[in-house]
Image (cartoon, helix red, strand yellow):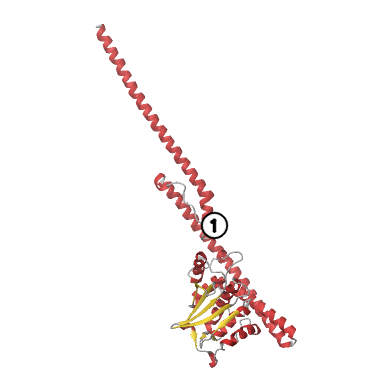
Amino acid sequence: MEQFLLAAAFAIVAGAGIAAGVLLARQRQATAGLRDQNAALARGLELREKELRHLADVRLPELMESLANPGVRVTGPLHDLDREAPAYGQAIQTVVDLFAGSAARVQERADRSAKSTLRAMMRAVQSLANEQQLAISHMQERHDDPDVLEGLLRIDHMNAQLGRRAQATAVLCGSWPGQQRSASSLTDVVRGATSRIRDYLRVNLEGTLNSAVTSRAVEPVVLTLAELLDNAARHSRPDTAVEVNFRSAHNGVAITIDDAGVAMDADELQRAADLLSGDASVDIHRLGDPPRVGFAVAGVLAARYGFRVSVDSQSPYGGVRAVVFVPSALLTDIPDGRAPEPAAASRAAEAAAVESTPGGLP
């Protein structure tokens, strides 16, 4: 009997020990699982904290900067959120998209406001420049002293440059060129553009064509050529010439401008092509400091009036070749039966252009 009781007691104790061992093993397993779970939660929390800090300190500032400077690269997340935290990654991307949309709308409103202000200011400047030109013309009629006339001509030329700058800025801000002219020969159009730049004496016009630009396109083509000629003169040595030629095509005329400056690299050519295409609205905040408006103005006018401008070929003199292609729809016959001046007289005509109106047109 005692042996039976001892055996039973042993069995009970052994069973209890086994049960305790099983419970202990399960407890240890549960503890290890909780420890791993806590570690995973800690890693997830650390990942989220790092990503949130990275978003606030790096990604959003870069995104804001990229709106003003397309060359800025916006950094992505630090971790593979699609794999490690897909829901959190989607939430972060939603924040980025909302921020980008809001920032773009704010910038668009700021751009419209800035353009509206500049447009109003440039209208006032253009009006003053026109009044000043009339005053200069009246003074030229009243004086015959050579020294006085020479000074008035210099002032008139500087006033023409001021008017061109104001006109170009206004065009970038959505205004029309603002001057309506009669149809003018291609020679007169080039002379008019030449008279609006500082280094007009460096421009050589080679050859003539028996064609004229239609009335509605005269001022846009003149302003475009003036900006391109000014660019060519400013980016080449002062002792070199800027050469202008006409080339007939079956569906229009190409006006080529060659300088002997430094050719543009691939990035500059791409930026110029983007501006000259006129496909997108010009952001005046991205034109640099000081602003470089020449290509932007040319692109806006070309898209608006139907001619084309390109700078994708190199000048035979090592610099840049700009081409303004005027289609047949914007060309007409020489008005009043006037023949274009011979090429030999073109240089003298250009030098004398400052003696006429600020546009250099008859």
Residue most extreme to the bottom = 337
On screen, residue 212 above or below 261: below
| Residue at image point 71% right, 83% down | 150
Can residue 61 be seen at all in this image of the molecule? yes
Residue at label 1? 65
The quadrant the C terminus occupies is bottom right
| Residue at image point 35% right, 27% down | 26
Left or right, 8 with reference to 351: left
Judge by depth and name the residue closer to the eye, 30 or 61: 61
Location of residue 180 (image quadrant) = bottom right
On screen, residue 196 above or below 337: above
Counting from the top left corner in percent of width and height, residue 290 is at: 61, 66
Left or right, 226 with reference to 8: right
Dot 1 surroundings within 10 Å: few (below 14), some, or many (20 or more)? some
Residue type beneath disc 1? Glu
Judge by depth and name the residue closer to the eye, 322 or 314: 314
Disc 1 on helix, strand or loop? helix
The quadrant the N terminus occupies is top left
Can residue 177 be seen at all in this image of the molecule? no
On screen, residue 64 above or below 79: below
Counting from the top left corner in percent of width and height, residue 270 is at: 49, 66
Judge by depth and name the residue closer to the eye, 203 or 231: 203
Counting from the top left corner in percent of width and height, residue 141 is at: 71, 88
Residue most extreme to the top = 2
Judge by depth and name the residue closer to the eye, 19 or 210: 210
Counting from the top left corner in percent of width and height, residue 44 is at: 44, 41
* Count of marks overlaid on the render: 1
